[in-house]
Image (spheres, helix red, strand yellow):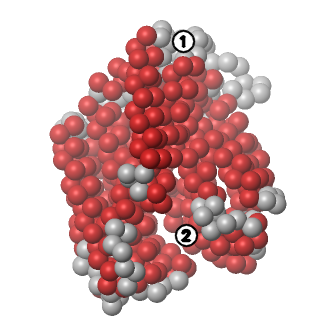
């Protein structure tokens, strides 16, 4: 909790239901800006990497860790960050992680050597791993029913907007002001969030959460996620059969097994395994997993084809692909309004089919292709599916979760998208570079094969959504219990 804010009372949920907060839409704006910033920071560094490499003396193989360090910390700690926010107070953790993100961003911008920058990026990722699920759980405990669906639609739209803005402003910032400003840009945003949060956000925490902390569960699941994300991140460089990949994947399985055993035996588990009995929860999170794989897999292949085969500059690629991000923003906003009538299952299936259709259109790429003929149709088909999948996956996974588990569920939901992103990049990159020639024709054939892999991923995601998600047209809102 924040200073000068009394602790929320541990009132049994069945006896307490908070009235709608009149500040809730202002609170949503604050939360969405925070999510926008996290999504912006995940991508904005991409176009600044050449300048960072040159000025700080990175080797070509090491500079990718400026991206990987952030994603590894973020993906590995999201679940733990969500649970800790449940236990210690969601607003408290949201503000603390925002402050840490501010300091880490300042440190990144002031870095004078590779080691310091990578260390600061790890701290940024850790802060984002707490900030994201705590913000989403505040949203879930602030809104109910159809208002919650609309809020999730706006949340998803801001995430897509952050990723889009990163592609548009990363290059110009690095060119005009220097690469340090891709980090400094976060400082005023964090300061604004910290200034508004005490007046717009209510504090909440899991009822009866003052018991012991499941240290064994926290260590094993965090280590498992870090090992898995590291293994998948390195697959494009070393391959699936490399001892490093196999060893990390084996360690992941062993740690997950230990985690399950611990959670079955402790009195206050980090992750109550009963949460996975909900088909809606499992289906919604799988929707997020497949959406992450498709979004990042498609984006990688389109970027490689546009630059290596068609010869477009990074700025032109960013401008050209902006259409799918804009469509995803529009669709996520509209889906938040429609999903109460259509149901999460129908929306998720349609979303996967749209993304699969977009990837199928990309398979027609040719070495002498053009943007209008070979990229634009696929981007137009793919874009709406992103927003629909994000809203459907969030609503299905989170709408029926108990308030006490809101942070945990939000962390799992966010982690599934990040893990899916890592898998999508690993799978498509492996398929796309399986050939030995770098001629335009060979590259195009490899990218087309990668797009076919995306079609298969989309078809699998649609099938699982159809089987796991219910036909409920109005997801039952979880009761909201807030301490002020």
Element at label 1: loop
Find residue 37 and report its image quarter. bottom right
In the image, taking residue 389 as reference, residue 258 lies left or right, namely right
Q: Which residue, given by chain and number where applicable, does mark 1 sit on? A: 208
Q: Residue drawn at (52%, 61%), measured in percent from left and top?
A: 163
Viewer-side residue, 212 vs 208:
212
| Residue 272 can be seen in this image | no
In the image, taking residue 50 as reference, residue 56 lies left or right, namely right
Look at discs 2 and 1 and give the one toward the viewer. 2
| Residue 343 can be seen in this image | yes
When the figure is inspected, residue 482 is found, relative to residue 237, above or below; the finding is above
In the image, taking residue 324 as reference, residue 73 lies left or right, namely right
Q: Residue 452 appears at what percent x and percent y?
A: 25, 66
Find residue 51 and report its image quarter. bottom right
Q: Residue 383 appears at what percent x and percent y?
A: 35, 65
Q: Which residue, given by chain and number where applicable, does mark 2 sit on? A: 167
Viewer-side residue, 174 vs 402:
174
Which callout, 2 or 1, points at the residue further toward the start of the chain?
2
Element at label 2: helix
């Amino acid at each position: 909790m924040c200073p000068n804010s009394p602790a929320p009372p541990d009132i049994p949920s069945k006896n307490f239901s908070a009235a709608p907060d009149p500040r809730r839409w202002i609170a949503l704006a604050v939360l969405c800006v925070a999510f926008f910033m996290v999504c912006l920071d995940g991508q904005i560094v991409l176009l600044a990497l050449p300048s960072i490499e040159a000025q700080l003396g990175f080797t070509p193989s090491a500079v990718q860790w400026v991206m990987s360090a952030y994603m590894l910390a973020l993906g590995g700690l999201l679940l733990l960050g969500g649970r800790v926010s449940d236990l210690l107070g969601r607003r408290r953790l949201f503000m603390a992680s925002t402050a840490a993100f501010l300091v880490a961003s300042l440190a990144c911008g002031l870095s004078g050597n590779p080691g310091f920058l990578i260390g600061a990026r790890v701290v940024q990722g850790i802060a984002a791993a707490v900030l994201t699920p705590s913000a989403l759980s505040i949203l879930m405990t602030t809104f109910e029913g159809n208002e919650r669906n609309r809020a999730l639609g706006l949340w998803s739209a801001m995430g897509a907007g952050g990723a889009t803005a990163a592609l548009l402003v990363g290059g110009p910032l690095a060119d005009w002001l220097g690469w340090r400003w891709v980090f400094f840009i976060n400082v005023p945003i964090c300061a604004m969030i910290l200034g508004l949060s005490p007046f717009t956000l209510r504090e909440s925490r899991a009822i009866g959460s003052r018991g012991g902390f499941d240290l064994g569960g926290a260590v094993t699941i965090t280590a498992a996620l870090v090992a898995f994300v590291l293994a998948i991140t390195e697959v494009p460089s070393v391959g699936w059969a490399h001892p490093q990949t196999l060893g990390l994947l084996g360690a992941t399985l062993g740690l997950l097994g230990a985690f399950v055993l611990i959670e079955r035996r402790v009195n206050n588990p980090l992750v109550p395994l009963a949460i996975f009995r909900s088909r809606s929860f499992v289906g919604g999170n799988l929707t997020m997993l497949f959406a992450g794989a498709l979004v990042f897999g498609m984006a990688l292949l389109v970027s490689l084809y546009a630059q290596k085969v068609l010869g477009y500059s990074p700025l032109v690629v960013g401008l050209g692909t902006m259409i799918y991000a804009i469509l995803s923003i529009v669709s996520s906003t509209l889906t938040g309004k429609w999903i109460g009538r259509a149901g999460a299952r129908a929306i998720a299936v349609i979303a996967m089919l749209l993304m699969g259709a977009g990837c199928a259109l990309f398979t027609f790429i040719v070495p002498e292709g053009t943007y209008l003929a070979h990229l634009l149709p696929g981007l137009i088909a793919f874009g709406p599916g992103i927003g629909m999948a994000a809203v459907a996956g969030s609503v299905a996974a989170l709408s029926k979760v108990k308030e006490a588990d809101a942070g945990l569920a939000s962390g799992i939901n966010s982690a599934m998208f990040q893990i899916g992103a890592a898998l999508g990049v690993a799978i498509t990159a492996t398929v796309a570079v399986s050939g030995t020639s770098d001629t335009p024709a060979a590259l195009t054939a490899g990218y087309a094969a990668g797009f076919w892999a995306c079609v298969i991923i989309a078809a699998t995601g649609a099938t699982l959504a159809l089987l796991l998600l219910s036909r409920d047209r109005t997801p039952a809102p979880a009761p909201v219990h807030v301490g002020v």
